[in-house]
Image (cartoon, rainbow, N blue to C red):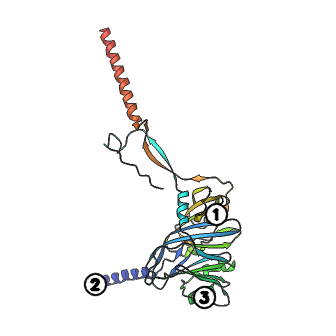
Amino acid sequence: MKRRILVLLFALLATQLGSLISPAWACGCGAMIPEGYARIGVEKETSVVRWDGRAEQIVMRFVVRGDAPRAAWIMPVPGRATVELADGAVFGQLSQLTEPQEKPRHYFWPRDGDWPFSATAGDRMVGAAPGAGAPSVGVVGREQLGDFDVARLTATDPDALRNWLEDNGFKLPDGLATELKPYVDQKWEYVAVRLAPRQQGKKLQGTLDPLKIRFDSERLVYPMRLSRMAKTPQSLGLYVLADHRMEPGSTIGGSAPKVTFAGTVTARKGTPLAELTGGEPVFLTAIDQEFPEPARIDGDHELRATAKDTPYRRTVYHDELLTVGDGVPVWLLTVSAVLVVSAAAVTLLLRRRRRTS
């Protein structure tokens, strides 16, 4: 019996240790890798994509959790990219523009909280509904942006890319070279970001500064293939700014994408959103998608214009008691009227009986 208990305890301990050294490294459109045995996970990822038919800009912001003091993130891009810090206020602007519209939905009979079931009716709350290297690797730029050490690379061999990254402090999981090969075959380049806070002892936690990545592209593409190596379900949220309403060409192994907003918007001058749009009216499409089984992801998202620029906005209904005038319940007036009519009818009937008696 004692031996069985020891075996069980050892198995449980091994399981816990295994969970500590197995990093959660994949995120919505790239690879997030912690240093050594530390852990890091992307709790939330929000991206804004601006495409004008010639160039694409992606503004990304991560909310991370874990105990890693340093980590690396890799993102493939179809062309030569520039990277800079972005203004996180753009996410707040887009959130306001796409919030659901609220509409009342009236009910006739009183409910719990309405008079006479409650002496006072409370206020109703309505909830609102992501250096030199091997010959086959080229470094086209490297810069320090806040807490980010950004390297922009080209590569013609996936193993050479991995070796260069590891030589420069990026420890990649086994098997990533295989996942990078399709990008190498298409002669894509890479943005490699080392997340290294300059403050001694600081951990990578909470909301990171957003990055803006820009590259030329005649098609609107959002890299997703590396997320197939994730071990937990993934979610994707995109704000797409283009000339028309956009939609993914396929589900690429996830659930059906959901459009949560579609419509023309114009940003106020001097705001971060206006910097992306040039201050001109653009069509905004907000898309959410879930990936319950990341291993089924079989490509990158390619977005295309829909047949019509049909606007859409979610509606959130809040129930209200049907009233008139200064808030008098309609049911009370109705019941009162019925009682008055009934009383009048009874009175009239009694009078007739008295006359005939």
For label 2, the SS is: helix
Residue at 60 percent across and 56 percent down: it is 262
Residue 202 in the figure: left or right of residue 171: left
Q: Nearer the viewer, mark 1 or mark 2?
A: 1
Q: Looking at the picture, which amino acid does disc 1 mark?
A: Thr
The residue labelled by disc 3 is: 164
Relative to 350, say whether 96 is above or below: below
In the rendered view of the protein, which quadrant contains the C terminus?
Answer: top left
Mark 3 Cα within 10 Å, few/some/many (few <14, many 20+)? Answer: many
Q: Which mark is residue 114?
A: none
Q: Are marks 2 and 3 in contact (CB under 8 Å)?
A: no
Name the spot of residue 321 as percent of width and height, x first.
41, 41
Q: Nearer the viewer, residue 302 or 75?
A: 75
Q: Provide the residue designation for mark 1.
A: 277
Determine the secondary structure under disc 3: helix
Residue type marked 2 = Lys
- For the residue carrying disc 1, how many other residues have a C-alpha within 10 Å: few (<14), some (14-19), or many (20+)? some
| Among the two numbered marks 3 and 1 on one chain, the one whose residue lies closer to the N terminus | 3
Is there a contact, CB below 8 Å, between mark 3 and mark 1?
no
Residue at 68% across / 76% down in the picture? 79
Name the foreground residue: 273 vs 306.
273
- The alpha-carbon separation of the residues under discs 3 and 1 comes to 36 Å
In space, the residues marked 2 and 3 are separated at their CA atoms by 51 Å
Quadrant in which the N terminus appears: bottom left
Q: Earlier in the sequence, mark 2 or mark 3?
A: 2
Q: What residue is shown at x 67% (from left), y 80% (from top)?
A: 184
The mark closer to the camera, 2 or 3, is: 3
Q: Residue furthest left?
A: 2
Q: Which residue is mark 2?
A: 2
